[in-house]
Amino acid sequence: MFRYQHLIFSTCCILSGLPALLPAADVIKPSIPAKPNVLFIAIDDQNDWIGAFGGHPLAQTPQIDRLARRGTAFLNAHCQAPLCCPSRTSLLLGVRPTTTGVYGLAPSFRSLDGWKDRVALPQHFKANGYRTLAAGKIYHGDVGGPAQRAREFDVWGPASTVGTLPQKKLIGPTPMGNNPLIDWGVFPHKDEDKGDYQIASWAVNQIKSAPKDQPFFLATGFFLPHVPCYATQRWFDLYPDDDSVLPLVKEDDRNDTPHFSWYLHWSLPEPRLKWVKEHNQWRNLVRSYLACTSFVDSQIGRMLNALDEAGLSENTIVVLWSDHGWHLGEKGITGKNSLWERSTRVPLVIAGPGVNPGGRCNQPAELLDLYPTLIDLCGLTHRTDLEGLSLALQLVDATTRRDRPAITSHNQGNHAIRSERWRYIRYADDSEELYDMDRDPHEWENVAAKPDLASVIADHRKWLPKTDSPLAKNSAHRILTFDKSTDEATWEGTTIHRNDPIPE
Ligand SMILES: [Ca+2]
Ligand SMILES: [Ca+2]
């Protein structure tokens, strides 16, 4: 009974525009500042190999874990697209990729009629009296010229860079184009010369010198552990030089996944597991990725310390998220661009005034939810054109049910539906996968063909996006289309026939 009344009360307050967390004053801190600051932390290509998220037993992320203790960790949070540009576009606009048609690394939504003037999340903060600042990668790519940049954020800090580079690739040439970004390992350089260190330094200075009479929305986008995963020895040595660092993989795992599942990452610079094993690079890649994760964690710690030292922690909402996950051998691949857990699950933590400390939410959550959630937490003007659901209730009581599963799309017609227990995948050629995440957390056994699970599939199919837009104008890079009438797919402009060998 209590729960029911509580939900009714909370929902009414949110709908009426009252401070969203007011009704739960008995379980949260009593004073929520009218306009709390926001520290908005994005990590690029960071999967769930974070201590508090349990994706890797050896991951060392003491700073993010500290933040998770102070706030609520969303343990079943997923991106809306397993790729930078569509994921970030969705989060920043508050609408799904299946609404905008932005599925690839291009176009920028600011080049599209219908979206070029849409008020993005940082602009909504600005319109509500906030000073907005950004450093590193928040948007994917350029938003436009100086005039457009000034419209997106008030203050721009350093751009996203790797920083110091080795003189040549450390791992040698890689298949599918020998892309210069596909590299990893240790070489002598200084942490201070890395792009992410400089972004944190800039953010620390902004926190220390923040005007007292205006709230801030400070967005920091970290580059690592995006490839190239270069680390100094100090971070590399946190992880053992033996096979205990490797993720669990099943050798014949793709035998029961549809052939179409390969089309989603048909030909990419990221090497297959077969290549990294044959070239003795698997352990090196995994250690490098983990080392970069720990390095970025420490930079986040510097910003959290700055908030403490400036006396702003009690008055600042901290949001930490990644744009999508990354495979390191699972399902035979490295990289993103899949609809499985390792690619869609992201770390998501929200901490600060009004948030129940130590909350652990297992309800499905979407990065799409951040826009309406921050509107509630910060008392911004409400909007009726957002497709996410506010997580305000889960921030008070992490067990509060969220009926909608998390939905991830990769190009038109390919979708994953992640509920509390199940992952259902439907590809454009109507092939399917179903995983029981309670019994099979590695997604090793596709049970879609089991007759007794037909009702589970039917329940999940209901959530397939009703709007499934075709490609936005000038879509490019990692673009897949499928023609049912010919049974032919097109990847990056090249036709794939059913019997074509899977590229290695
Ligand atoms: Ca990314
Ligand atoms: Ca399998």
Image (cartoon, rainbow, N blue to C red):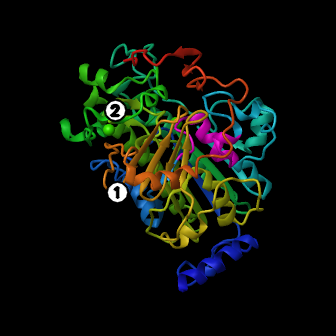
Q: Secondary structure at mark 2?
A: helix
Count of numbered circles in the view: 2
Instruction: Report the residue marked by disc 1.
Output: 438
Which numbered marker is on residue 254? 2
Say whether residue 42 is left or right of residue 117.
left
Does label 1 or label 2 sit earlier along the sequence? Answer: 2
Establish if 370 lies above or below 27: above
- Return the residue nearer the eye: 80 or 173: 80
Q: Residue at x 63, y 51 (%)?
A: 218
Picture coordinates of residue 332, whole percent (x, y): 33, 30
Q: Nearer the viewer, residue 454 or 281?
A: 454
Is 95 magenta? The answer is: yes
Magenta residues span 79-99
Left or right: 388, with 301 as reference point:
right
Residue 22 shows in this picture? no
- Tell me if I can see residue 12 in this picture: yes
Quarter of the image where one finds residue 234: top left
Q: Residue furthest left?
A: 242
Q: Which mark is residue 172?
A: none
Find out whether residue 141 is within the magenta segment: no
Q: Position of residue 455 (x, y in %)?
A: 47, 56
Q: Could you tell me the amino acid type at mark 2?
A: Arg
Q: Ligand 2 shows up in which quadrant of the image?
A: top left
Q: Which amino acid, by three-letter code, is at mark 1?
A: Asp
Q: Main secondary structure of the magenta part?
A: helix
C-alpha distance separating marks 1 and 2: 20 Å
Is residue 181 depicted above or below 87 in this figure? above
Of residue 128 and residue 259, the one placed in the foreground of this image is 259
Depth check: give the residue in front, 211 or 27.
Answer: 27
User: Element at badge 1?
Assistant: loop
